[in-house]
Image (cartoon, coloured by chain):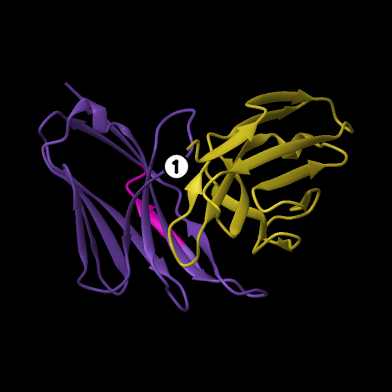
Chain colours: A yellow, B purple
Amino acid sequence: NAGVTQTPKFRVLKTGQSMTLLCAQDMNHEYMYWYRQDPGMGLRLIHYSVGEGTTAKGEVPDGYNVSRLKKQNFLLGLESAAPSQTSVYFCASSSIPYEQYFGPGTRLTVT
Amino acid sequence: EDQVTQSPEALRLQEGESSSLNCSYTVSGLRGLFWYRQDPGKGPEFLFTLYSAGEEKEKERLKATLTKKESFLHITAPKPEDSATYLCAVQVPLIKAAGNKLTFGGGTRVLVKP
C-alpha cells in the first residue's frame, strides 16, 4: 500500500515549456486535490476532483489544467510554464468527510 | 473569506521544555480542524482531526484542543525528533461541489534542541 505517489520528484523547466505532473493513489479515494506550497503563502488549492471524470477549480487555478480519467490518477498540466509557477506541488486524496493524505511533493523550478 | 492564522511562526525549544502552538480561525461552516506535521522535503502527515469545541485528541507527546475560535497543539516534554513544521487546516464546504476543502495556516516551525 503506497498511499499517494507523485512523479517526478524534481523538474526544471524553461519559461514557455509544458509538462505534466502525475499523482496516483491506491486507497480507492473519491476525492483528489492539487496544492502548491510557497514560502510565506502556505498550501493553496489549485484544482480538485470529486470523482473519476470530474474536475473543478480551486483558489489559484490560472495557468494549470487537470484531468482525472481514472479514479486512481490525477494529472496536473502546465501548458506554458512561467517563473511564477516555481513552487512545490503536492497531491492529496481523501474519502469524504475524512482527512486528506498527501504525497511527497514535486519541486518545480521554472527559469 | 476563510482565514487561518498560526502563531508563533517559529519556536525554538530545549528538549523537555513544553510549549503550545496556536491556530486561530475565521470560517463559515467549519467541518473539522486538522493538524498536520511536515518534515523538510516531505508532504504533510496527518496528526489529528477535531470536530467540535471542547474536543481533545492526544498522540504521544502531542495534544490538540479546540474552542470555537482557535485550536492549540500542546507539545509536552518535546524531543529533537519532534522538530518539524506543524500545519493547521480548517475543513470547509466546497462551493461548487459536494465535499470539503482544506484552508491552511502558514505553519509553525518547531526546533527542539537536545
Quarter assignment of residue A109? top right
Eyeballing the image, is B9 above or below A44? above
Residue lying furthest bottom: B29
* Range shown magenta: B4-9
Residue drawn at the location 74% of the way across and 55% of the way down = A61
User: Residue at label 1?
Assistant: B44
Q: Is residue A77 visible?
A: yes
Q: Quick one: SS at disc 1?
A: loop
| Depth order, front residue of B9/A78 | A78
| Depth order, front residue of B106/A2 | A2
Residue drawn at the location 41% of the way across and 46% of the way down = B107
Q: Type of residue at label 1?
A: Pro
Rate crowding at label 1 as few (under 14), some (14 to 19) or many (20 or more) other CA atoms within 10 Å.
Answer: many
Query: Could you tell me which quadrant the N terminus of chain B lies in?
Result: bottom right
Q: Is residue A39 visible?
A: no
Query: Could you tell me which quadrant the C terminus of chain B lies in?
Result: top left
Quarter assignment of residue A22? top right
Magenta stretch, main secondary structure class: strand
Position of residue B50 in the picture relative to residue A99 (left or right): left
Position of residue B83 in the picture relative to residue A11 (left or right): left
User: Percent x, y for residue A9?
Assistant: 62, 26
User: Percent x, y for residue B112?
Assistant: 23, 29
Eyeballing the image, is A80 above or below B59? above
Q: Which chain letter goes with mark 1?
A: B
